[in-house]
Structure formats: C-alpha cells, structure tokens
Image (cartoon, rainbow, N blue to C red):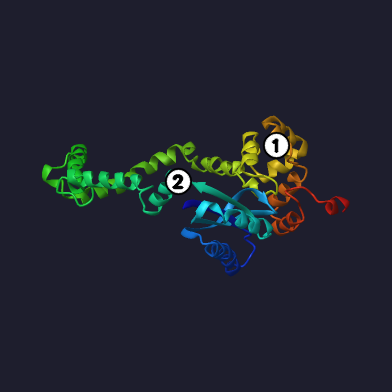
Amino acid sequence: MRQYEVTFVIDPVLPKNEIQDKANVYIDFLKGKECEIVNIDELGLRQLAYPIKRRNSGVYYCVEFKNEYGAAIDELELEMRRDEQLLRFLTVSLDKFGVKYNQDKRDGKIGTVKKKSTEDKDGKDNKDGRGRGGNNRGSNGAAKSAAPKTDAKTEAPKDAVAKTPAATPAAEATPAAAAPVAETTTPVAATPAATPAATSTDATAKDDLKKVEGVGPKIEQLMNEAGILTFAQMAAAGPDKMKEILAAAGTRFNRHDPTTWGDQAKMAAEGKWDELKKWQDEMDGGKATSSDEEE
C-alpha cells in the first residue's frame, strides 16, 4: 500500500470542540475509505505566512495514512474544497525516505544529537574534576588555588587562606577611602548621563508590522531594510514611499497595495486596536472594500 500525508488548516475562529470535530470528520472519512491511519499530528495554532480569508493564523493538522493506489485522494480533496471552514490543505505522496524520516522523528532518533553531546561534555567535566560533584580538585580546589593571589596583595600569612571572611573588611573599607575623592572631583558624578543612552534604544524598538493587514514576513523584512521599523515610521512614510520599496523588490510584489497600510499603522501606533480590528475585518487582504471607499 502507498503512504500519503495530508496537512490541512482549520479556521481558528471556531470553538475548540468544533475544531476537533472538524478534524475528526476527515479522519473518519479516510477510515471509511479503508485507509490505514499511521499517525495524527495536532500541530495547534500557528502563524500564516500571509493572510487567508482575513485570517492571520490557523489550526494545523497533519494525518499520515496508507491507501491502495491513492483511490481515496480525489474524493478527500473534493470534500476539502467544498469546506469553507478550511483555509488550506495539501496532500503529498511519501517515498521510502519520507516514510523513514517520519518514523525516525516519532521514535526520537531525530533532534537528539545536540542533547547527547551536551551530556558527553558534562560527563567529561565530572571525570576531570571540573564539573559539579567532582573531587577535591573541583570547585573547592579552584577557590583555594585563587586564594594565594589575594593573600599576596594583602601580605597575609599563608595559613590565613581558609579565612575568607578576613577579606570582607577590606572590601567594605574601599568606599570609605574613595569618599573624599568624590567630594574633591565633582565632575565624576556624571553617572545619570548614561540614562538617556539606555532609553534612546527604545526609540528604535521594532514593532510587529505584520499586524498591519496585507503585510507578511517578507514585506516586513523589506520595510525594515528600508529603515521602517515601527508603526509610527510606516505611518509617516506614506503609500508612495512603500510602493517604491515594493517595486524595487521585484515584480512579484506589484500585486500588493499599500494604500491603507499607513492609516492602519497610525491607528496601531496610537493604540486604537479595537478600531483597527473592526476596520481590518471589513478589508480584503489589506485593501479597502468598495463600501469603505464610498464612505
């Protein structure tokens, strides 16, 4: 029997129980067509690469099954095309390498190399006495070997190595000795000047431009490369500037219309999320509908 894999995306606005029922409809359909279900992956809610039916995310399911000559594939895809609650679906035929890869992944043979190497490293460190739980040459030995350097500076006796608290008064005395210097050199108290530098990074904080209807990950990358990182910058750029950015990226971006992007970004920058969401529900892929234009 041949082995297949069907991945489908369910509209996330459905209640949780209806989403599960929708997935079970197609699983039961395959069982009714004498298909052997090999594995079912509930991948959960994931971000879409681009908006579909005004949705920016969807609930993913992946079902791996066996069927003789793929006789049930045509009927399955026909049912999925008629279902308006499915955003997308894809059916593929698995060769022997795809079957083995999926099985190895389920058995945990893929993606565990890094963890194993870390364990080997930890074991090596413990063996050498450098890791946790080592012998006297471990962490305690390292502390003792560093102690003579401190004793050499303070000229303390060699047998005073174990008396680590003795170094504490010297550390506490340091601020008292440095106090007169702070009084005589007033320009030294310029520490608050570092505060604006720390807050200046907030001005260049990057916003999630994908919240603008019609903007996907690739377009967000183009805008960032052009210096548009925030909603405020996108609102200030205007449609003409964004059209130039899209045109420079190639002809495949000509179908995108940034007419409403600036207004959407302005509402996002002002925190008008409810108003923005209501407007986006009336859009078609980021474009204003005819009713919006008449208004």
Compare residues 23 and 249 and report the one nearer the observer: 23
Reading the image, the residue beneath label 2 is 98
Distance, label 2 to label 1, CA atoms, is: 34 Å
Q: Is residue 194 above or below residue 70?
A: above
- Which amino acid type corresponds to the residue marked 1 in the rendered image? Phe
Q: Find residue 290 and name its label.
A: none
Q: On the rendered structure, is 120 left or right of 271?
A: left
User: Is residue 39 left or right of 114 when viewed as pictured?
Assistant: right
Q: Quadrant of residue 223?
A: top right
Most foreground residue, 191 or 233: 233
The amino acid at mark 2 is Gly
Secondary structure of the residue carrying numbered label 2: helix
Q: Position of residue 12 (x, y in %)?
A: 62, 60
Task: Classify residue 11 as left or right of residue 131.
Answer: right
What residue is disc 1 on? 253
Is 258 displayed left or right of 59 in the figure?
Answer: right
Classify 10 Å Cα crowding around label 2: few (below 14), some (14-19), many (20 and above).
some
Closer-to-camera residue (281/262)? 281
In depth, the one of 94 and 288 nearer the eye is 94
Residue drawn at (65%, 40%) of the image: 219
Q: How many marks?
A: 2
Considering the numbered disc 1 on the image, is that residue within a helix, a strand or a loop? Answer: helix
Of all residues, the one furthest to the left in this rendering is 159
Residue 205 percent across, percent down from the top left: 59, 44
> What percent of the width, then of the height, locates residue 174?
32, 44
Q: Earlier in the sequence, mark 2 or mark 1?
A: 2
